Amino acid sequence: MKSYKIIIVLLFAILSQAQAKQKNFIIIFTDDQGYEDLSCYGSNKVKTPNIDQMAEEGIKLNSFYVASSVCSPSRAALLTGRMPKRVGVPGVLFPKKNEKGLSSDEITIAEMLKEKDYATALVGKWHLGHDKKYLPLNQGFDSYYGIPYSNNMSIADGIDIAADVVLNDGYTLEMMHSDISKVDEESKKGAKNSLKNKPPLMRGNEIIEYPCNQNTLTERYTKEAVSFIKDNKDKPFFLYFAHSFPHVPIYAGDRFKGASGSTPFYDAMMEIDWSVGEVIKALKENGLDENTIVIFTSDNGPNSHGSAKPLKGRKFDTYEGGQRVPAIMWGPQDIKAGVISDEIVSSLDLFPTIAKYADISMPKGLISDGYDISKFLKGKSKESPRKEMYFYGSNSTKIDGIRVGDWKYIINGYRKTSWRKLSEEDLKPKLYNLKNDVSEKNNVIEEYPEKAQELIKQMNAYDATLEKSTKK
């Protein structure tokens, strides 16, 4: 009997040791941050020493792409490793009644990691559906703390309200319910939402604060993230830390207001850099830094306050500035340090790469649009397995372009808006060699018509596979 107990103890110790060796994963996702909006990417308007240090100790990617130039589809692709069109989230979701979201049939990174009993948390912006069936707790996350969509949006009908909800700005429960009714009525009539910049703050499936005090939001997000790290230091975890800024309206805590000496956008970026430093510090203080992979990137190109230089375009566009974003990956034991790479990598690649690091097989029958880039990150391969990237217009399922190697073919590039009228030149198909022309200034389609036709053929063939997969 005694020997039996000893065996049980040893087996438990072995199991505990195996669990301790499982990798932790943190994805830090900013909102509307541009390619140039870090000092390690060339900004002279802000200093981001903590993120710069990550870049020095990890890999800095110069050709990293998200799957969309707007938020909801970009986030859907990040979490599933599948194109937005494939998962049914091709455009931005809004806080209106009966709005759809990311289907619970989709498998998120959080759900995948549950196979190995990971603790999972989302801190920050969700924006993949506000009805309960779409919220994070039904998508593999154990906990959720944040704003359910963009911070310039309003409260929505259909979200539970906590019994001890905190009301700000002189609000009463009656006024809160009046706002919900107003948004609901406007939604039914197809009218424009007149209540903006008053999002709710949620914990789990409930609204805990309305309107959310956005002045302290980054600080509170960071406190929540650090607490999650400390509370789960003895088991593997996945933290998806999705900042609400520098999306407009832009807020920064009191000690960061004016700190950049530039604009509120860069004040917010300084606070985000501080937040990154707090996350890394928490990992080191709890002995987790050697066993954790941290990924920092943005959901799409910059809003009107940021910069995508030297790239052309910004948020909403399928020029490089819309979907090519800064990206840094850090992991002392798993990612080669001091690397700056121009290899093509995408947020779509995070799902299969995390699966590989966690020793989890990809779900059977799943059509993935990502590549396992673990060998590339470890320095075992100089090349990324990804050689191409596809571009889709914002809020559209219509394909707009393709990059293969150094060549990019694009149909439009700019999104037509009330403030941007497209010229005849803008509407012409374009071919660029990004190695020689990263700013997409010189359309060489007339000089290389065969290359354009080659890319068009590949682009349309891929789009047809997406079309087929979305039809029942």
Image (cartoon, rainbow, N blue to C red):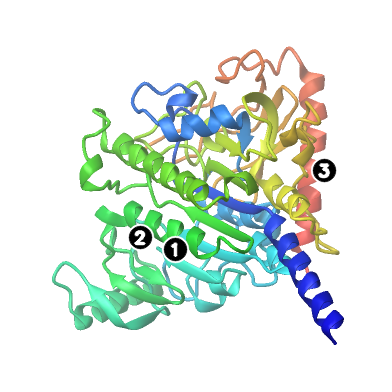
Check disc 1 and report its element: helix, strand or loop. Answer: loop
Report the Cα–Cα distance between label 1 and label 2.
8 Å
Residue found at x 85% / y 64%? 364
Whether residue 388 is visible to the viewer of this picture, yes or no, is no
User: Residue 223: percent from the left, percent from the top?
Assistant: 38, 57
Report whether 3 appears left or right of 63.
Answer: right
Q: Which mark is residue 94?
A: 1
Check disc 3 and report its element: helix, strand or loop. Answer: helix
**Quadrant of the image containing the C terminus:** bottom right
- How many C-alpha atoms fall within 10 Å of the one at disc 1: few (<14), some, or many (≥20)? many
Label 3 vs label 1, nearer the camera:
1
The relative height of residue 413 versus residue 229 in the rendered view (above or below) is above
- How many C-alpha atoms fall within 10 Å of the one at disc 2: few (<14), some, or many (≥20)? many
The answer to whether the residues at label 2 and label 3 have Cβ atoms under 8 Å apart is no
Report whether 40 appears left or right of 165.
Answer: right
Identify residue type, mark 2. Answer: Met
The relative height of residue 310 versus residue 400 in the rendered view (above or below) is above
**Quadrant of residue 406 in the image?**
top right
Check disc 2 and report its element: helix, strand or loop. Answer: loop
Q: Which mark is residue 120?
A: none
Q: Which residue is mark 3?
A: 461
The answer to whether the residues at label 3 and label 1 have Cβ atoms under 8 Å apart is no
Residue extending farthest left: 170
Q: Which residue is mark 2?
A: 153
User: Residue 95: percent from the left, percent from the top?
Assistant: 41, 67
**Quadrant of the image containing the N terminus:** bottom right
The answer to whether the residues at label 1 and label 2 have Cβ atoms under 8 Å apart is yes
Residue found at x 27% / y 81%? 177
Identify residue type, mark 1. Answer: Phe
Report whether 286 appears left or right of 169.
Answer: right
